[in-house]
């Protein structure tokens, strides 16, 4: 009988998100390296035959793919920074001491 996986900790816990982000960054780096290898390959073809328009097109496409992979890394890092700032803001709010209320404010609250 198949059992459903029930995580012991919340699925979107910070450490799990960090691990996922590391994996995405590693994959993007691999994609970028492959795109640059492809660019180098087509660049060699174009250098031997400058009239090969198909290779020139593929060379430009490979450069676009390498830039897209780089942009994805920047987006992941931006999300991680925003997440960290949000966590810090929440921690500051939770550690903030309770504001003291005057007797007048307490009386007004009770009257409502």
Image (cartoon, rainbow, N blue to C red):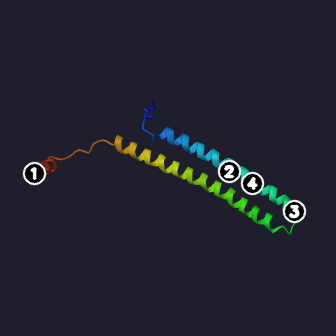
| Res 19 quadrant in image | top right
Question: Residue placed farthest to the top in the image?
Answer: 1
| Secondary structure type for disc 3 | helix
Q: Which mark is residue 31?
A: 2
Question: Residue placed farthest to the left in the image?
Answer: 111
Q: Is residue 46 left or right of residue 73?
A: right
Q: Residues within 10 Å of mark 1 (few under 14, many from 20)?
A: few
- Alpha-carbon distance for marks 4 and 3? 16 Å
Q: Which mark is residue 86?
A: none
* Residue named by callout 3: 47
Q: Nearer the viewer, residue 32 or 52?
A: 52
Q: Residues within 10 Å of mark 3 (few under 14, many from 20)?
A: few
Report the mark closest to the observer, 1 or 3.
Answer: 3
| Secondary structure type for disc 4 | helix
Tell me where residue 25 appears, x and y as whole percent: 61, 47
Tell which circle, 1 or 2, labels the residue nearer the N-terminal end. Answer: 2
* Residue named by callout 1: 111
Q: Which mark is residue 36?
A: 4
């Amino acid at each position: 009988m198949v059992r459903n996986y029930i995580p012991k900790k919340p699925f979107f816990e910070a450490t799990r998100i960090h691990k996922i982000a590391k994996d995405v960054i590693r994959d993007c780096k691999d994609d970028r390296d492959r795109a640059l290898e492809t660019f180098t390959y087509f660049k060699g073809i174009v250098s031997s035959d400058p009239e090969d328009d198909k290779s020139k097109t593929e060379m430009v496409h490979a450069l676009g793919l390498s830039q897209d992979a780089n942009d994805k890394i920047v987006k992941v890092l931006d999300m991680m920074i925003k997440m960290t700032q949000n966590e810090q803001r929440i921690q500051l709010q939770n550690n903030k001491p309770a504001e003291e209320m005057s007797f007048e404010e307490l009386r007004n609250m009770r009257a409502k």
